[in-house]
Amino acid sequence: MTSLAAFGAAGLLALAGWRIGWLTPGGAAAGWLIGGTVFWRAGPVGAVLLGTFFISANLLGNLRARGGRKRTAATRDARQVLANGTWAALGTLILPAAPALGWATFAGALNAAQADTWATELGIARSATARLITSGRPVPAGTSGAVTLAGTLGGVSGAILLSGIAFSLGLSLSLASGALLGGIAGMLADSLLGATAQGRFYCEVCQAISERRRHLCGRTGRWEGGLRWLDNDGVNFLATAVGAATAVAWARLW
Ligand SMILES: [Zn+2]
């Protein structure tokens, strides 16, 4: 795809994503950048894979926002888009120089985002309580680092779907199976980092633990644990890197 066609098509899709409420204006700009890069360097195969992630993640998010227990906006902002898409886009940039490394990075990182998003959306929609991946302690569904059976099965399904599409579009069995492993590894890394390293803050007014220093009510919370600077977007960025690294390692072994 020429760069003009790629960034033109990605721009139209990002605009549509903003119009239907899936992206904030900043999220649309970030999506345009990520999508344009992927369309340009990875062509129709990259476009279908990225499109599958983008559309399925948002459909599940809207489903949850409408029918779920917690009514939360499913609109993605720039930080969320970049946290999920940066490693995938970087993978496509190295495609001309190192095709196998580039595809493994792209597919592994994207599938980590896919598995984690499906796990989060389906886990919150289907379960009231979840358990921390580290201690097994029951916590409300949606807590960082919490896992549920529905969420885990959902995440694995999402990873199988995307790697299956990748294989049917011509990616080798080595790359497709590496993407599947990368998706699952990324999802686990996301839960582990969420339970241990992610910053936790306590809002004394609402008496609630939050992953954000500034609580939803607008007050600044007291630091409880974890790394102060590491929020959910940072965890997603690291987890997609784990997905990419797993797929790359698998492709090299095989
Ligand atoms: Zn509060």
Image: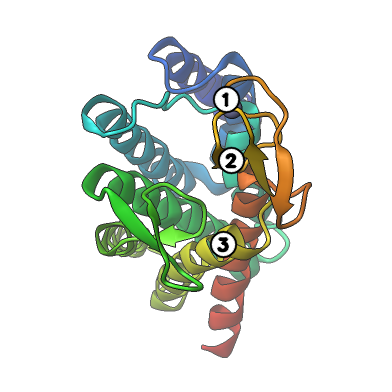
| Residue picked out by circle 1 | 216
Identify the amino acid type marked 1: Leu
Circle 2/circle 3 CB separation < 8 Å: no
Q: Residue furthest top?
A: 19
Identify the amino acid type marked 3: Ala
| Residue picked out by circle 3 | 195
Tell me: is circle 2 under 8 Å from ligand 1: yes
| Residue picked out by circle 2 | 210
The residue positioned 71% from the left and 36% from the top of the image is 213
Q: From the viewer's perspective, is 85 left or right of 123?
A: right
Quarter of the image where ligand 1 sits: top right
The residues tagged by marks 2 and 3 sit, at their Cα atoms, a distance apart of 12 Å
Q: x, y (%) of residue 46?
A: 48, 47
Identify the amino acid type marked 2: Ser
Circle 1/circle 2 CB separation < 8 Å: yes
Vertical arrangement, residue 103 with respect to residue 37, above or below: below
Circle 3/circle 1 CB separation < 8 Å: no
Q: Nearer the viewer, residue 173 or 23?
A: 23
- Of mark 3 and mark 1, the one earlier in the sequence is 3
Vertical arrangement, residue 208 with respect to residue 75, above or below: below
- Of mark 1 and mark 2, the one earlier in the sequence is 2
Tell me: is circle 1 under 8 Å from ligand 1: yes
Q: Residues within 10 Å of mark 2 (few under 14, many from 20)?
A: many
Q: Nearer the viewer, residue 182 or 252?
A: 182
Q: Secondary structure at mark 2?
A: strand
- Of mark 2 and mark 3, the one earlier in the sequence is 3
Tag of residue 116: none
Q: x, y (%) of residue 111?
A: 45, 58
Q: Residue furthest bottom?
A: 253
